[in-house]
Amino acid sequence: MNYAQLTQAIQEYCESTEQSFVANIPNFVQLAEERIYNSVQIPAIRNNVTGTMSPNTPYLGLPDDWLSTFSLAVIDPDTGEYEYLLNKDVNFIRASYPSPTYKDKPKYYAIWNDGFMILGPTPDKAYTAELHYYYYPPSIVTAGTSWLGTNYENVLLYGSIREGYTYLKGEQDIMNYYESKYQEAVSQLKRLGDGLDRQDAYRSGQVRIPVT
């Protein structure tokens, strides 16, 4: 389902072609996308970048579209050794490495603010950093198509209808029906994103549901 088909379906399900309703369809769809992306950790919301840690600087910049970190690895430029860093809080890093002048290969990272991580210890050379992180992928509103629209159109459709029907202040029983259809579609998506896609995951802290 592309965006044009989704827009048409929303109007038909909600039985409204009123000008202000149609003008707000992009908002309905984007609200539904955010709700879905915050409910299920599907591969489509994961991105990765590589960069270089600055020697003698304990901070590492985050991408502009970063929401949360999945993993951070450091690659030694001399040996090519690849090693994952452990996620800690800022207090741990400050207590473990009170002086930023102590330099070595980083072992830990913490979120400093929405633009930077802090590393511990301070990098002693220009290591390569590989960051896997969660982000909001381009919306079907602007891209025309999306992973959700192509693979799980029901969850996107019912999520958008729910937002549209809320805008129309529709009957509660109909609202409950569309909410139940949305939850049913989300449960199917969770089986993929938090179940089948995680069967071989070994790192602790990941959302993972058993599937058969």
Image: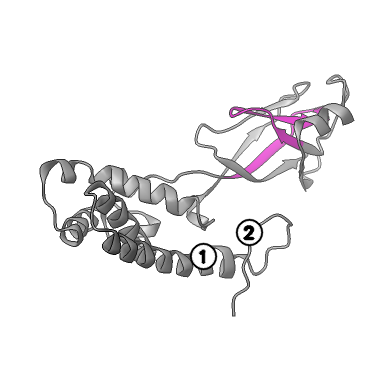
Q: Residue at x 39, y 57 (%)?
A: 147
Q: Which amino acid does label 1 sit on?
A: Lys
Magenta residue span: 109-133
Q: Is residue 45 magenta?
A: no
Most extreme residue toward the front, as rendered? 172
Picture quadrant of residue 150: bottom left
Q: Circle 2 sits on which residue?
A: 207
The reply to whether residue 40 is in sight is: yes
Instruction: Point out residue 143 in the picture as x, y percentages from the top left corner.
Output: 31, 46
| Residue beneath disc 1 | 190
| Residue at image coords 44%, 64% | 186
Which quadrant of the rendered structure holds the C terminus? Answer: bottom right
Side of 126 relative to 147 (left or right): right
- Along the line of sight, which residue is nearer the eye, 197 or 9? 9
- Does 130 appear in magenta? yes
Give neighbour class at mark 1: few <14, some 14-19, many 20+ (Cα, 10 Å).
many
Q: Where is residue 5 in the image (x, y as percent from the top left)?
A: 21, 58
Q: How crowded is mark 2: few (under 14 residues within 10 Å), some or many (20 or more)?
A: few
* Horizontal and vertical percent position of residue 89: 76, 35
Q: Tell me the chief SS of the magenta region.
A: strand
Quadrant housing the N terminus: bottom left
Quadrant of residue 123 within the rendered picture: top right
Q: In this orientation, which residue lies closer to the viewer: 19 or 90?
A: 19
Give the number of the disc on residue 151.
none
